[in-house]
Image (spheres, rainbow, N blue to C red):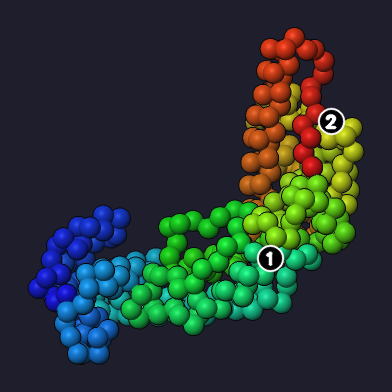
Amino acid sequence: MTEQTSNNALLLAMPDSPVNIEPPEELYRLLAERISRYTMGDSTSIPAETARRLLESILYCLDLNRRFPVADVPQEAPLMTRWEAGVQQAKRIAARAKLLLRQAQRTPPPLVNTAYCDTLESLPAFFVGYDPDFFAQEIPCSFDYPLCLPVSELLLGAEFIQEYLRKLLAENSILRAFPSEALRALYERYYIDYVDLLVNLCLPAAEMATLCALANQPVHPLLLTKEALSWGNKQLAEESEAEARAAIVGAAARALEELRLHGAYPVELMRRTALDLVTRVRAALMGLQTDQKRSGETGSSPILDIP
């Protein structure tokens, strides 16, 4: 694809990209330069899909420079200068992500999960294949391990990998705060086969730790009696939604304090899983109570059997 055939249709096909704030003719000149560099000067004609990927990378790097400006590159600087600053920012993010990967490799969770291990083996491929000069927005590797709180799909390239690893490390810090025996017993109740299934290891531990704190029970064993669980269910069911949410968030904070965990990522993880938990518990209890009314049963609030 030549510069002449890279017409407005290529930009208009990318409605979510910040194309309107840059002069199209300047973008085309930069795209033509990138095409020439990509083909090592041998050709000005490349497949339309490759041209699109190159343009996406240019726009992404310009957006990086806007979001992470540097003092010596004002927003009034030439397009090429701002794009180069964005490329350098992508490289810095990738370098930080690589350090996070090394930390994750040094601090695995106490128990083995196949998807987790496969993901740690796959992630180094990103740093081998990542090409911020041409395709800064791409993620040249695949991995399967699901996080407790997924990374936003709005993040691209090294930003996505960096955020994934930050959240993975937060999960690992939570898991490493518990005895492996307690985790194993919890997983056997929660997942049955936690080794080979594609499951998240942190979610059940975070939820049970919060429930233990809510019931004023020790957090580290990750175990509640049916009586304690019933008390927690009743509290969440009978209070207003605002009161229940405040109670569960407070329980998550107490669990973190008992586990001696700090930092924005573990705090956010525990808070969000706690809020998701209270929503799910209240919905399940309301469903059980509705079923009881339909069948004519009476009695106290039912026990939601969370593992």
Q: Residue at x 52, y 78 (%)?
A: 125
Quadrant containing the N terminus is bottom left
Residue at 68% of width from left, 29% of height from top? 284
Residue identifier under label 1 = 114
SS for dot 1: helix
- For label 2, the crowd category at 10 Å Cα-Cα, with few meaning under 14, some 14 to 19 and many 20 or more, is some
Q: Is 74 situated left or right of 41 in this image?
A: right
Which label's residue is closer to the chain start, 1 or 2?
1
**Residue 262 showing in the rendered view:** no
Q: Quadrant of residue 35?
A: bottom left
User: In front: 200, or 258?
Assistant: 200
**Dots 1 and 2: beta carbons under 8 Å?**
no
Q: Where on the picture, by quarter, is residue 23?
A: bottom left
Residue 231: image tag:
2
Nearer the observer, 85 or 215: 215
Helix, strand or loop at disc 2? helix
Amino acid of disc 2: Trp
Q: As displayed, is residue 230 above or below residue 19? A: above
Q: Position of residue 220 (x, y in %)?
A: 86, 54
User: Which residue is painted at 84% across and 62% down in the image?
Assistant: 180
**Mark 1 or 2, which is nearer the eye?**
1
Residue 259, position in %: x, y?
A: 81, 57
Q: Residue reaching furthest top?
A: 296
